Image: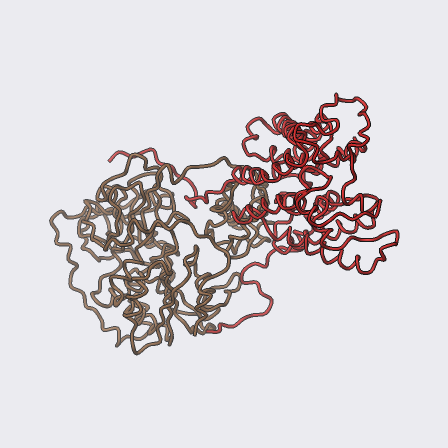
Chain colours: A brown, B red
Amino acid sequence: MFRAARATFRHGVHPPEHKELTGAAPIRRMPFPSEVVLPVRQHAGKPAQVVVKPGDHVERGDVVAQADGFVSSPVHASATGTVTDVGWWPHPDGSSCPAVRVAVEAHSSQIARERRVPDWKGLSPEQIVRAVQDAGVVGLGGAAFPTHVKLVPPKDATITTVLLNGCECEPFLTTDHRLMAEQPERVMHGVRIMMRALGVPKAVVGIERNKPDAIDAMTAARPTDLDVTVLPLTVKYPQGAEKMLIEAVLGVEVPSGRLPMHVGVVVQNVASAATIAEVFETGQPLVERVVTVTGRGVRRPGNYVVPVGTKLADVLEFCGGLTEDAREIVFGGPMMGVAQGRLDVPLTKGTTGVVVLTDADVRADDALPCIRCARCLDACPVYLNPSTLGQLARVERWEDMERAHLADCMLCGCCSYVCPSRIPLSQLFAVGRGMLKRRRATP
Amino acid sequence: MTAPRLLVAASPHLKAPLSTARIMWTVTASLLPVLAAAAWWFGVSALVLVAATVLGAAAAERTFVGPGRLRDGSAVLTGVLLALSLPPGLPAWMAFVGGAVAIALGKAVFGGLGQNVFNPALIGRAFLQAAFPVAITTWARHRQGFFSLAGDTFALPFTVPHPLDGTTAATPLGAFKFEGHATGFLDLLVGDTGGSLGETCDLAVLLGGALLVALRILSWRVPVAVWAAVAALSALLHAVLPADAAWHCPDAASMLVSGGLSLGAVYMATDPVTSPITRTGSWVFGAGVGVLVVLIRVFGGLAEGVMYAILIMNALVPFIDRATQPRVFGTRAAPQEAKP
């Protein structure tokens, strides 16, 4: 049995949850916009390669960019229409990225063309992995790591457990919550297929205790013929980080610099599981996802199924627009999400939420020097010394930061969150990582 | 839809409400019970001294660190803490100089907030001890009435203070060390003794400290370590040193509640800037302070040792921190297996 009494990791923070805005809002479908923009980079790994040209007619579910190698993922048209352009477009990570623009056919039924859906029971693990990659499934928790890669463990690793991540520890977000509460059978079906692909006898679904309806629904939907456990976890950020989740559920630390597979675990997001189930139910690739549009700065918050590539402006318009005091729009959660500077960026496969923060939310205090109060040390889930790392960053001693285990930082932002002197610690660490990477690239 | 004026900042986009300035002002406010006790026992002189040190500290902060920085509250806190460590009859002008020196030599020369090695209030006190050795060891009697000025509060700068015959008394530690006279535990606890402004009433100090611990502003590890070390070592020395020997030690209970131990343990040794940042280091640091306090009180030439104990341990903080860095997640020595 699991050490349910523990059910969490050490350190971390507990920001106000703000989930009441959308936690009870059923998932609704957002109408198709007049245009979708599909960046070739919507996943960790090599960007996809565009296979369409302007003027091509595409149907919902057609491949517009194909995977470039194994650690890559294809991109599919999320709506039926005509390719108008293939070129650079603003990307939600702040950069630009080649993207396929599709003018959506106004009166299309948007029903995907008939596909041959193989019965997953008759497929080998390799064939399942192939089908998952072909469907463009990536981790829907935010990091967007190609899901199929994590279904193929290296030869030297023995996987014993699939860990389903239903923590959703970021404040505001409720997509996984609603998905588990409304479609637990679909999530469990995805779990079943994952267990089959990995040849693993056991699965654990970790859900934070602030989602009791999701815990109940998922517990009721457990397959009777498989060893699947639903484990309620303490509400704490970043409970959904892979290493923290593994510590909470199995009580082991993933060694520094190693992957969860090293301790026999594969972690997958619950929404990714639901998407895999969909792939084998209807053959529909990853062309839409559930997004929480929330925050006190948006007039009609809710949980919406949004076609991938829908532009931020269209999403906000559907949700009633911004309030007068809306100040910052974040893709993802407020702890690790990326602030957006323009409204024509598309939502991608990794966009878990659109959080609109108000002036009151982002009110800033003066930045002061570090007073060594140790709050960051007490918050850091991987036991770093952010205070010292921050002071090293200020004097650009990147190599010293590397020796102080900068590589173990997950950029979760706990240190910046608690810092009473408002030192942008995790931002400094991201800069440090960038500088080290650049130095290694140019010897 | 027209684009609003959007903020594009790095994550995290939310911040915990507690700011450094709020920490400083809250600690200052938590000293109100101590200030009240000081006013109760020593009268209006206590309040005059607090005003003098705060003015001195604020003036130095404004001059050497910058006018905008008074808002963070750290200079005012230093001033109040310095005053609480001074004898009630000290001339106010000396207190003003002490406050200015505390900030100028204790903080500004190191680069301002967060950069100093030593506790600024104790630097100010150490300066006064060196500059005015007589005045700072002259202890005006307590309970002289609220409006009767203790000693030389308003002495003009650089005049020779007139002797305070009949209105001075030894502190409990001095009385024990030099006269072999012990003070009652209850008197020590409530502060019905001579001594520095903020150190006599341990109850008020503990009240303020408990408030800060409840607000999660104060690290409780340091004071607990200090008290534990003092209790253990003084109990040992009390048992082994004969009462009539040249060196002898009061019992542990008296040691804990006499002198500036509570004030030092709760408010000085816990200064985050000048104490270790690691949890293990906090224990080491606190224990070190406690041991040094007992050693100085029993074997040293001074009756009281809290100030030097903390300053010495301040100097060791970088070494303590270096030796007690946290173990990074996933770097346990022995490889571990999943135990489902």
**A322 in relation to A29, above or below:** above
**A197 in relation to A398, above or below:** below
Q: Is residue A59 left or right of residue B230?
A: left
Q: Position of residue B304 (x, y in %)?
A: 77, 44
**B254 in relation to A147, above or below:** above
Front residue of B10/A97: it is B10
Taking the image as drawn, is residue B313 in sight? yes
Identify the residue at image location x=43%, y=68%.
A4
Q: Is residue A44 left or right of residue A367?
A: left
Where, by quadrant of the figure, is residue B268 drawn? top right
**A440 in relation to A424, above or below:** below
Looking at the rendered structure, the number of numbered marks drawn on it comes to 0
Front residue of B1/B133: it is B133
Identify the residue at image location x=31%, y=51%.
A20
Front residue of A280/B27: it is B27
Q: Position of residue B139 (x, y in %)?
A: 76, 35
Q: Position of residue A328 (x, y in %)?
A: 35, 39
Q: Position of residue A301 (x, y in %)?
A: 26, 46
Where, by quadrant of the figure, is residue B305 drawn? top right
Q: Is residue B14 left or right of residue B29?
A: left
Q: For the N terminus of chain A, which image quadrant?
A: bottom left
Taking the image as drawn, is residue B117 in sight? no
